[in-house]
């Protein structure tokens, strides 16, 4: 029996209604920008497997470093012990993170990096003698699926069963030129009236909200305001981190830097799961005390796994390389040219781009998760391009190593879709 049939017997896939969508494509191999399925088809991975494999699948430099690490030290508990890959990774990360970041805390995935950030913010105030019970977040944000992360994410039809158990969150609209005064006043009212512990946001690009983008200047003003009120600011850079926005981190577009930053996707170049919550020394200082209980008692069994750390180190080396930086420039340029070309197409409603993130909204009315999305997905896959439209948005976030021919193939397929749907 082929894999996709055997799959059906025991597996339960994430984010899936199995009754409606029983079929899963079996991938047997991945290399560079390509995914290969069990039927012998190959696909350009136009979304870098959820923005993780930014240096290409099974990147040889990363796998070489990782296999060497595997023979050296596989794992050791990170409470009470330390090791070279973690120490070195902290040093290398601090070099490229926004300059106010000083401390690196490990966890396992994007959601846990957000939960850690929320707990840090709450305990930061608690340790200083203040009980604050509210978090402010953007409408339509996505921060993950664990309880804390789910709470600060935009209200979703999928949250129904859990609604009564979520933490206390107030949501404000994402600012734009038209609503800014209103949003700012709403934000200010919340800051004045409520016991606000933290403000969390996806800086500049809301990934799961179909790559919605907002202005750095407006976000910067909100961050500044939050700081005026002593509210901890948390930038969830799980999606935007590591070069995707044209800078290493989207927070670099801000003058007022966030106190806490969450990182995960593409941290290890897609090889293994790992996440980091970094913070400033101001946040960290509230946890230093002669009282044991003021420490941060959060930890995961695989925190700072040496193998994952070695993958992350190799990834950062690649990110810093001239080769990758040049490719990033070329992709940004190619996206611009493509955007200009299709701008006037009758089926294109809006085009957005920041760095290597490119998105276009189709001029088609539909239910957000309606059928068109699946039709488009199949249309692209049948043509050897893996793109996962979100609602009526088609977005491209390919590995940095993609070449111009491969990019052209993605663009041509999108144009064909524009002429078809
Ligand atoms: C994917 C994502 C998360 C959740 O990460 P997981 O590793 O899937 O738990 C959190 N925040 C943002 C912005 C993301 O894109």
Image (cartoon, grey):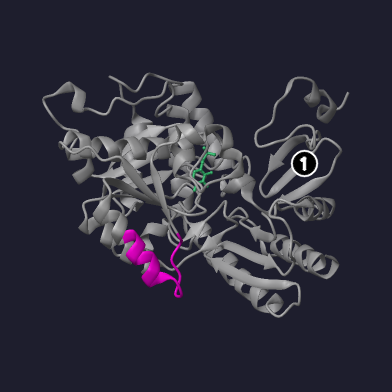
Q: Is residue 31 above or below residue 6?
A: below
Q: Residues within 10 Å of mark 1 (few under 14, many from 20)?
A: some
Could you say which is closer to the camera, residue 210 or residue 241?
210
- Decide which of 134, 31 is in the foreground and name it: 134
Q: Looking at the image, is 116 positioned above or below residue 92? A: above
Comparing 282 with 194, the one in front is 194
Classify residue 196 as left or right of residue 128. right
> Is 177 included in the stretch rendered in magenta?
yes
Q: Is residue 33 left or right of residue 125?
A: right
Against 191, residue 278 (above or below) is above
Task: Tell me the magenta residue range.
Answer: 173-187
Residue 146 spot, x, y in % from top left:
49, 33
How far from the left and from the top, in percent, is residue 328?
54, 62
* 116 magenta-colored: no
Secondary structure beneath label 1: strand
| Residue, disc 1 | 36
- Residue at x-position 83% and y-position 55%: 379
């Amino acid at each position: 029996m082929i894999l996709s049939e055997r799959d059906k017997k025991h597996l339960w896939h994430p984010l899936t209604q199995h009754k409606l969508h029983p079929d899963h494509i079996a991938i047997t191999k991945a290399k560079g920008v390509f995914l290969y399925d069990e039927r012998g088809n190959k696909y350009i991975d136009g979304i870098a497997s959820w923005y993780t494999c930014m240096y290409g699948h099974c990147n040889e430099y990363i796998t070489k470093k990782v296999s060497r690490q595997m023979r050296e030290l596989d794992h050791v508990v990170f409470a009470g012990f330390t090791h070279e890959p973690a120490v070195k990774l902290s040093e290398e990360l601090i070099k490229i993170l926004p300059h106010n970041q000083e401390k690196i805390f490990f966890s396992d995935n994007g959601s846990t990096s957000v939960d850690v950030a929320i707990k840090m913010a709450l305990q930061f105030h608690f340790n200083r003698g203040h009980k604050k019970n509210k978090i402010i977040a953007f409408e339509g944000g996505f921060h993950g699926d664990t309880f804390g992360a789910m709470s600060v994410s935009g209200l979703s039809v999928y949250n129904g069963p859990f609604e009564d158990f979520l933490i206390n969150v107030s949501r404000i609209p994402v600012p734009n030129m038209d609503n800014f005064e209103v949003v700012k006043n709403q934000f200010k009212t919340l800051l004045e009236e409520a016991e606000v512990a933290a403000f969390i946001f996806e800086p500049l690009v809301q990934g799961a909200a179909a790559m919605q983008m907002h202005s750095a200047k407006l976000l910067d003003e909100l961050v500044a305001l939050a700081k005026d009120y002593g509210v901890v600011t948390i930038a969830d850079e799980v999606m935007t981190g590591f070069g995707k926005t044209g800078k290493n981190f989207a927070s670099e577009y801000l003058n007022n830097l966030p106190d806490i930053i969450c990182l995960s996707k593409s941290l290890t170049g897609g090889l293994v799961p790992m996440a980091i919550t970094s913070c400033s020394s101001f946040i960290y200082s509230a946890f230093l005390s002669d009282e044991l209980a003021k420490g941060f008692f959060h930890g995961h069994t695989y925190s700072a796994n040496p193998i994952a750390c070695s993958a992350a180190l190799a990834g950062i080396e690649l990110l810093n390389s001239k080769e990758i930086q040049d490719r990033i420039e070329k992709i940004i340029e190619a996206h611009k040219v493509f955007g200009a070309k299709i701008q006037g197409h009758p089926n294109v409603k809006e085009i957005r781009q920041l760095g290597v993130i490119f998105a276009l909204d189709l001029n088609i009315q539909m239910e957000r998760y309606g059928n068109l999305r699946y039709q488009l997905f199949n249309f692209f896959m049948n043509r050897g391009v893996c793109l996962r439209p979100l609602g009526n948005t088609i977005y491209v976030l390919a590995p940095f190593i993609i070449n111009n021919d491969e990019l052209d193939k993605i663009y041509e397929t999108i144009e064909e879709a524009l002429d078809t749907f």
